[in-house]
Image (tube, rainbow, N blue to C red):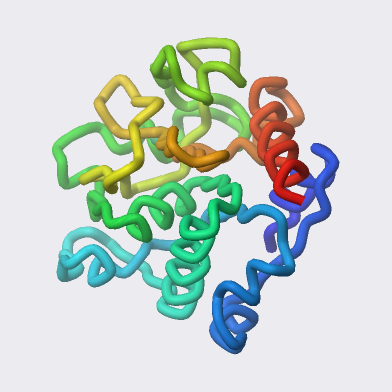
Amino acid sequence: MGRRYADAVSAAGGEPVWLEPADVLGARDAVSVLAEIDALLLSGGQDIDPQHYGEAPRPDAGITIEPERDAAELLVTRAALTTDLPILGICRGIQTLNVAAGGSLHQDLALLGLDAKVHQQKGVARTDWEPAHPVAVEEDSRLAALLSVTRAEVNSFHHQGVKAVAPGLVVTATAPDGVIEALEDPARPFVLAVQWHPERMVGHHAGQRKLFEVFIAAARRRK
Ligand code: MN
């Protein structure tokens, strides 16, 4: 599990450290966990329990939760924000970042009445690295600067999405149907999260490699 995240971090010159929920929940505090690392990558996974953004799970939303991961990730993400640790969020990771910072999620994009299929790769692309849909990237964002484009094609493996954007975060990429695909905190050294899976695209898309390179450069500055 997590090999492709680790490979993408290594290829960008970083040294991956995999944290299990027990590593965080069993530690003295989240700050002591973060003392061991120079940056935090929030990886993909199942759904965040809606209780963390003040909602009950909708029975029709098809939600699968990972309670221990929720607890551990919300703890370290809030600590990372407090200490200005560089953060890269991927898929579930953009959702973790948004919820940790006080935002909320759409429990199921299909319930919004939009075509949720394009956000689930299946039937849209043949491989997991081929794009499923385009995103419009905000011109003055860090994301536009590092991708060198304001329109990118991305893969997509999510049935949920960002609803209310947390205070301090700004939307920097959006799908044609309005689904939020990237968030940044312009006031912090490096806080960037994407709804797609760049670690599955790095072998074929230089721009997605750049995402990891800039993240690792931020970690190095921190060190
Ligand atoms: Mn998508």
Q: Is residue 67 above or below residue 194?
A: below
Quadrant for residue 136, please give it: top left
Q: Is residue 9 left or right of residue 200?
A: right
Residue sitting nearer the eye, 38 or 131: 38
User: Who's the residue at 23% across and 63% down the image?
Assistant: 53
Q: Give coordinates of residue 185: x percent, y percent.
A: 43, 38
Q: Give coordinates of residue 187: x percent, y percent.
A: 44, 37
User: Who's the residue at 48% across and 47% down the image?
Assistant: 91
User: Who's the residue at 59% across and 26% down the image?
Assistant: 130
Residue sitting nearer the eye, 76 or 17: 76
Q: Is residue 179 above or below residue 2?
A: above
Q: Is residue 145 above or below residue 194?
A: above
User: Who's the residue at 28% across and 48% down the image?
Assistant: 166
Q: Give coordinates of residue 40: x percent, y percent.
A: 62, 55
Q: Specify the quarter for ligand 1.
A: top left
Check the picture and name the quadrant holding the N terminus: bottom right
Q: Is residue 213 left or right of residue 83?
A: right
Q: Is residue 79 left or right of residue 101?
A: right
Q: Is residue 33 above or below residue 108?
A: below
What is the total number of numbered labels drawn onto the structure image? 0
